[in-house]
């Protein structure tokens, strides 16, 4: 008969073997889950395991290696591909149909796609479809974008849980919790850029209202800062809007022109957001016109800020030293759409990306003609594209084949 010690030894061996088998099975299933999750859009390659190891923190940082990759990608782009990076189209309510966006991706290398009121399942499907289409033809993949404000998130993503409107958020801790829930949802859906937070005051009830954090600069700034930091810490680009401020003005720029005669009081909220590292700013369609003692250096001649070089380049980029992405508000809004070639004017004003131009292809072809005869504009557009490319590298939105064997000096 076997001794009790021998029996115990056999039992220990079996226990160890079971443990090893269990660990092997765990890692095998975990690996399969990760592959399945990526295929289904559960995990976003832009947030985990980026091919080159960059994050949003690298966007503003001094990084010669990142600079070299930007240079290499810029050399691969035709002028049409460069210009197309400036375009953000839309899909959903009041946007293009899914098929129309597919056709646009077949024609041009779109900079981004904004989701405007789509069911969650549709967003998951479309991000996979549009990424696959872009990968067939281009090195650069599109940004996926949403108006993920606390007050609007359940309208932009049908099926999402309603969250407290911005005006009802009581303190910075609650704001971080709300922003954390939004960023988790956007990461799950492979959304890269959030057109939020609203940095306007809430005195304009027609269009801002509860979308704002309030009308006190310290409160608005404190909550906006908490929102921006939480978003960007979680790998989502935040966007301060609507520069230079829309919340203390009566009227709705969706419906017509709005012109004020003095600087908006929210201006310092935007300046503080810039100093704190916000990566994107959306310019609104508010016009400013008045006597020099009231408007100072902000006069747009009554034109919307989006098409005013004095506002976009002079104030935002030069005097306020914003080095991130400047995107327009939707260019099909009544306050700007009646101007001649408003999207071209927005680029000439210094905007880096145009949101929802009336005709994406016409805009692309028109700007292509413009830069062929204007070296200064060509240089400006190239600088905008460099910023877009840099951000796409940081988000993992470069086709992986670009890095494989073609560019040995990038490492």
Image (spheres, rainbow, N blue to C red):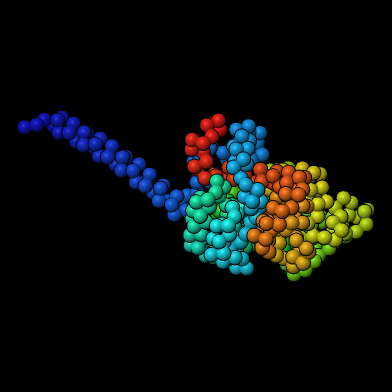
Give me the residue at 77% from left, 67% from top. 338
- The residue lying toward the viewer, choosing from 365 and 118, is 365
Q: Is residue 262 left or right of residue 187?
A: right
- The residue lying toward the viewer, choosing from 241 and 395, is 395
Give me the residue at 58% from left, 59% from top. 104
For residue 283, say whether it is visible. no
- Image location (x, y in percent) of residue 180: 57, 51
Q: Is residue 298 left or right of residue 347?
A: right
Q: Among all residues in the image, which is located at the extreme left?
A: 1
Query: In the rendered view, would you say 346 is above or below 24?
Result: below
- Image location (x, y in percent) of residue 313: 79, 48
Q: Among all residues in the image, which is located at the extreme bottom?
A: 255
- Image location (x, y in percent) of residue 133: 51, 55
For residue 81, say whether it is visible. yes
- Image location (x, y in percent) of residue 184: 53, 52
Query: In the rendered view, would you say 319 is above or below 250?
Result: above
Query: For the image shown, how many numbered marks are present on the structure?
Result: 0
Give me the residue at 48% from left, 62% from top. 121
**For the C terminus, which image quadrant?**
top right
Give me the residue at 62% from left, 59% from top. 89
**For the N terminus, which image quadrant?**
top left
Question: Based on the displayed image, in which of its 4 quarters is residue 304 positioned?
Answer: bottom right
């Amino acid at each position: 008969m076997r001794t009790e010690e021998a029996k115990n030894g056999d039992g220990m061996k079996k226990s160890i073997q079971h443990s090893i088998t269990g660990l092997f099975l765990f890692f095998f299933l975990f690996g399969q889950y990760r592959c399945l999750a990526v295929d289904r859009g559960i995990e976003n390659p832009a947030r985990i395991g980026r091919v080159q190891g960059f994050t949003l923190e690298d966007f503003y940082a001094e990084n010669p290696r990142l600079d070299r990759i930007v240079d290499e990608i810029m050399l691969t782009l035709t002028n049409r591909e460069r210009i197309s990076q400036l375009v953000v189209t839309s899909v959903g309510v009041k946007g293009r149909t899914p098929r129309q966006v597919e056709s646009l991706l077949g024609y041009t290398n779109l900079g981004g796609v904004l989701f405007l009121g789509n069911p969650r399942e549709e967003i998951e499907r479309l991000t996979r479809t549009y990424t696959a289409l872009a990968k067939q033809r281009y090195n650069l993949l599109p940004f996926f974008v949403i108006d993920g404000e606390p007050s609007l998130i359940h309208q932009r993503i049908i099926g999402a849980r309603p969250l407290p409107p911005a005006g009802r958020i009581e303190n910075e801790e609650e704001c971080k919790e709300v922003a954390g829930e939004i960023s988790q949802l956007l990461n799950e859906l492979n959304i890269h850029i959030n057109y939020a937070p609203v940095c306007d005051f809430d005195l304009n009830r027609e269009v801002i209202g509860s979308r704002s954090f309030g009308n006190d600069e310290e409160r608005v700034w404190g909550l906006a800062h908490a929102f921006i930091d939480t978003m960007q810490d979680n790998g989502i680009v935040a966007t301060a809007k609507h520069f230079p401020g829309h919340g203390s003005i009566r009227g709705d720029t969706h419906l017509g022109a709005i012109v004020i005669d003095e600087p908006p009081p929210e201006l310092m909220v935007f300046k503080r957001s810039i100093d704190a590292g916000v990566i994107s700013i959306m310019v609104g369609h508010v016009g400013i016109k008045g006597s020099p003692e009231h408007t100072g250096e902000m006069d747009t001649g009554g034109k919307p800020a989006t098409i005013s070089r004095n506002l976009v380049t002079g104030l935002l980029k030069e005097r306020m030293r914003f080095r991130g992405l400047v995107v327009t508000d939707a260019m099909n809004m009544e306050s700007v759409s009646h101007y001649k070639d408003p999207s071209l004017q927005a680029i000439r004003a210094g905007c880096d990306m145009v949101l929802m131009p009336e005709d994406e292809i016409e805009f692309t072809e028109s700007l292509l003609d413009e830069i062929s005869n204007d070296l200064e504009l060509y240089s400006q557009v190239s600088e905008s594209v460099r910023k877009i490319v840099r951000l796409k590298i940081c988000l993992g939105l470069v086709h992986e084949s670009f890095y494989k064997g073609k560019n040995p000096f990038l490492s």
